[in-house]
């Protein structure tokens, strides 16, 4: 009986801690915060709420499900990054290069999105509630617009 109980506890223990496991690579997160550069890093699920990522180089990085609430991404390079399901509520997204970026399911509620490049970005199921969008190829409904690439 004790052996069965121990076996059951051993099998169930990982389930209790599954939600507390962080998805991001702690070294990548530290690198980004200390240098402002983290090319092809794993920052999935990272808590970057309120972070000042002005001019950050995040090309090709994994940011799926990341918390970027209130983050300042002015001038950041997110070319080819994966932000699927990320939360950018009230984020400042100005002069950001999001060329070929996966933005599927991103929450841009109350975000400020100005003068950003979304050429060939994937943008399905965006939440744009109360977002301020200016001079950026993001819209609601209608036909696909010709979105220019930055030169």
Image: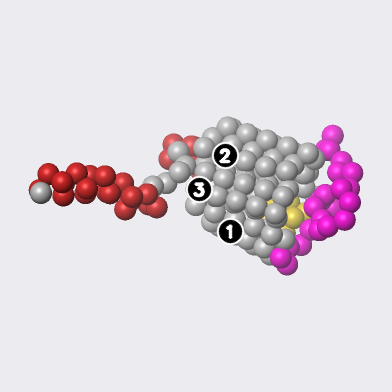
Q: Main secondary structure of the magenta part?
A: loop
Discs 1/2, front: 2
**Which sits earlier in the primary sequence, circle 1 or circle 2?**
2
**How many numbered tags mark residues here?**
3
Residue placed under numbered mark 2 in the picture: 62
Q: Secondary structure at mark 2?
A: loop
Q: Is residue 113 magenta?
A: no
* For residue 132, side relative to residue 106 (left or right): right
Discs 1/3, front: 3
Residue placed under numbered mark 1 in the picture: 69
Give the answer, above or below, for where 129 lies relative to 100.
below
Q: Position of residue 135 (x, y in %)?
A: 84, 52
Q: CA distance from mark 1 to mark 2?
A: 17 Å
Give the magenta range: 129-151
Within the image, what quadrant is residue 101 found in? top right
Give the answer, above or below, for where 128 lies relative to 38.
below
Q: Position of residue 75 (x, y in %)?
A: 70, 45
Q: Secondary structure at mark 3?
A: loop
Q: Position of residue 125 (x, y in %)?
A: 70, 54
Of residues 107 and 115, the one drawn nearer to the viewer in this rendering: 107
Residue placed under numbered mark 3 in the picture: 45
């Amino acid at each position: 009986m004790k052996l069965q109980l121990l076996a059951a506890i051993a099998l169930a223990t990982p389930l209790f801690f599954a939600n507390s496991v962080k998805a991001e690579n702690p070294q990548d997160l530290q690198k980004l915060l200390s240098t402002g550069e983290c090319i092809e890093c794993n920052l999935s699920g990272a808590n970057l709420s309120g972070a000042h990522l002005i001019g950050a180089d995040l090309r090709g990085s994994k940011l799926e499900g990341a918390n970027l609430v209130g983050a300042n991404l002015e001038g950041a390079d997110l070319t080819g990054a994966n932000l699927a399901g990320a939360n950018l509520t009230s984020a400042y997204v100005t002069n950001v290069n999001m060329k070929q970026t996966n933005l599927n399911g991103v929450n841009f509620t109350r975000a400020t999105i100005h003068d950003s490049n979304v050429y060939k970005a994937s943008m399905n199921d965006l939440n744009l509630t109360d977002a301020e969008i200016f001079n950026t190829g993001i819209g609601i409904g209608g036909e696909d617009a010709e979105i220019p690439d930055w030169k």
